[in-house]
Image (cartoon, grey):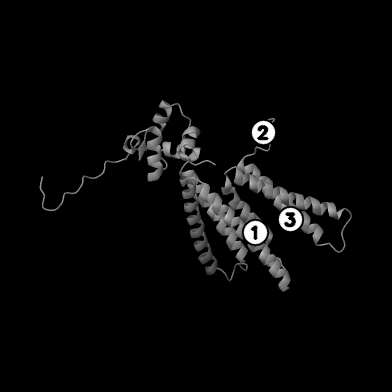
């Protein structure tokens, strides 16, 4: 999963430690998320969105596009 | 050390202090206490120094927990378990009970403290410990089957060494996962 954490943090001039404090996690966890080594849990992702006043999908984007939704049987395009 | 930064050491430094305190304290105390019926000159002071070192080891372990780098408590527990050697207690029931109760009480207290620290940590560190503990369990399984295959050629297995092996492989697993997630204590 890609994320814009580093950019959003830089825009607000926050350090990793400052963001970690706001999220109640360690600085190392913020670093791991920023570097794309760790995908946060859903509650933490929501907390990230709340801290930046953004929706989750404005902060995190999947590496690959999700497959197209299957149509219900009997429907044609 | 800068003035005003009282005892501000890193995790590995406190770990080293605790190991030296444990090993030195137990060695000194044992050296003197086995001769308690015929104490050498100045024996009291050697015992006092040994106890002071053991106290220092405990203080260093407390500092590790306070600094939030409690993963160092895993190898520390492994080393102290190696020193404790409950199997060395005499064959008398009273000795066995005393060593057994003491060892179990300390182990239980250490497990409870560690569980409490783990509950207070954040989700990534809990995950590192979960995956590290899985590595420890896997290493324990592989090690025990490997031992069973060659037990007629290997020295007799002591339960205490199994616990030491599990703790050390848990810690090794934790370090591997920390490296994988780029987590630095």
Q: Which of labels 2 and 3 is toward the front?
A: 2
**Which residue is tagged 1?**
B106
Q: Can residue A40 be seen in this view?
A: no
**Where is residue B92 drawn, in percent x and y?**
73, 73
Residue B96 appears left or right of B147: right
| Residue drawn at the location 69% of the way across and 49% of the way down | B57
**Which quarter of the rendering shows the N terminus of chain B?**
top right
Say if labels 2 and 3 share a chain: yes
Count all numbered tags in the image, as a single digit: 3
Q: Residue A58 carries which label?
A: none
* Callout 2–callout 3 Cβ contact below 8 Å: no
Place of residue A26 in the rendered image (x, y in percent of width and height, measured from the top left): 50, 40
Give the CA separation, mark 2 to mark 3: 30 Å
Q: Distance between the residues labelled 2 and 1?
A: 32 Å
Work out whether residue B69 can be spotted: yes
- Look at the numbered disc 3 and give the secondary structure of its residue: helix
Q: How crowded is mark 2: few (under 14 residues within 10 Å), some or many (20 or more)?
A: few
Of the two numbered discs 2 and 3 on the same chain, state the one appearing first in sequence.
2
Q: Nearer the viewer, residue B128 or B117?
A: B117
Question: Closer to the N terminus: mark 2 or mark 1?
Answer: 2
In the image, is B165 to the left or to the right of A65?
Answer: right
Q: At x 58% / y 56%, what residue is drawn?
A: B112
The residues tagged by marks 1 and 3 sit, at their Cα atoms, a distance apart of 16 Å
Residue position for label 3: B26
* Residue that badge 2 annotates: B5
- Chain assignment, label 1: B
Residue B141 coordinates in the image, percent (x, y): 50, 63
Name the spot of residue B164 as percent of width and height, x first: 60, 59
Q: Are marks 2 and 1 on the same chain?
A: yes
Residue appearing at x 61%, y 43% in the figure? B11
């Amino acid at each position: 999963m890609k994320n814009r954490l580093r950019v959003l943090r830089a825009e607000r001039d926050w350090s990793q430690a400052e963001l970690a404090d706001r999220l109640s996690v360690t600085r190392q966890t913020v670093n791991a998320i920023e570097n794309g080594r760790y995908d946060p849990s859903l509650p933490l992702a929501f907390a990230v969105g709340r801290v930046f006043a953004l929706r989750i999908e404005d902060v995190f984007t999947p590496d690959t596009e999700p497959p197209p939704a299957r149509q219900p049987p009997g429907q044609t395009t | 050390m800068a003035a005003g930064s009282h005892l501000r050491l890193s995790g590995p430094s406190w770990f080293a202090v605790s190991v030296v305190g444990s090993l030195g304290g137990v060695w000194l105390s044992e050296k003197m206490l086995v001769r308690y019926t015929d104490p050498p000159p100045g024996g009291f002071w050697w015992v006092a120094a040994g106890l002071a070192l053991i106290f220092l080891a405990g203080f260093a372990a407390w500092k590790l927990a306070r600094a939030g780098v409690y993963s160092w408590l895993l190898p520390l527990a492994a080393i102290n378990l190696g020193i404790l050697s409950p199997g060395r207690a005499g064959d008398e029931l009273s000795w066995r009970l005393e060593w057994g109760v003491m060892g179990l009480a300390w182990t239980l207290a250490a497990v409870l403290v560690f569980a409490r620290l783990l509950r207070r940590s954040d989700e990534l560190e809990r995950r590192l410990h979960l995956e590290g503990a899985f590595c420890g369990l896997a290493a324990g399984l592989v090690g025990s089957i490997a031992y069973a295959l060659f037990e007629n050629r290997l020295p007799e297995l002591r339960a205490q060494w199994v616990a030491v092996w599990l703790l050390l492989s848990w810690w090794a697993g934790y370090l591997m996962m920390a490296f994988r997630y780029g987590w630095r204590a």
